Amino acid sequence: MSLSKEHILSLLSEIPDPEIPVITILELGVIRDILVIDDTNIELKITPTYSGCPAMKQIEDDVRKKLTEHGFTSITINTIFSPPWTTDWITPQAKEKLRQYGIAPPETTTEDKSWLTGKTKAIACPRCKSLNTKLISQFGSTACKALYQCNDCLEPFDYFKCI
């Protein structure tokens, strides 16, 4: 058994996000750090996408299960809130996977604060790529997504909000 950080990362890269199974927890950016203490002790730091994210318990369970299946026996998982998670941590590959899955990925970085002004921005439809879309609700299938509709193909879609 290898206790290298790289080996542990490769195992964690196999764990899908519980709410969006097309991307992994690594691609989502919730794994913040891995510390190999010694031959039997591993500590992981994870950050929720938002403070009340219901998927965090499932992510913890999935991490423990994956690492236990590969012979790790002493696993400490600490949830950290600082720095807070941001959509900037989603990998470019994951953003493309989201788009192909039918979820519009965050269009910009967290520097975009247009939502504070109440102005809605044009979000490209992940199906037909049209910018002729409208915000239906600030809350989509999960709290981290908003619900939009394309005015051209008429399909509703989730938009992963910039956080």
Image (cartoon, rainbow, N blue to C red):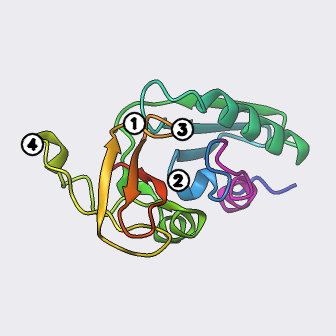
Residue reaching furthest to the left: 117
User: Could you tell me if the residues under marks 1 and 4 are in contact, i.e. CB atoms within 8 Å?
Assistant: no
The quarter of the picture where the C terminus appears is top left
Query: Which class describes the residues within 10 Å of circle 4: few (<14), some (14-19), or many (20+)?
Result: few
Which contiguous range is marked in magenta?
5-18
Relative vertical location of residue 128 with respect to residue 123 in this rendering, above or below = below
Specify which label sits upstream in the sequence, 1 or 2. 2
Q: Which residue is mark 4?
A: 117
Specify which label sits upstream in the sequence, 2 or 3. 2
Residue type pointed to by label 2 = Leu
Residue type pointed to by label 4 = Thr
List x then y, in percent, for residue 89.
42, 55
Residue at the image point whose x is 41% and y is 75% from the top: 129
- What separation in Å lies between label 4 and label 2 (alpha carbons)? 27 Å
The quarter of the picture where the N terminus appears is bottom right
User: Could you tell me if the residues under marks 3 and 1 are in contact, i.e. CB atoms within 8 Å?
Assistant: no
The answer to whether residue 163 is seen in the rendering is no
Dot 3: element: strand
Specify which label sits upstream in the sequence, 4 or 2. 2
Q: Which residue is mark 3?
A: 46
List x then y, in percent, for residue 11.
75, 56
Q: Which residue is mark 1?
A: 139
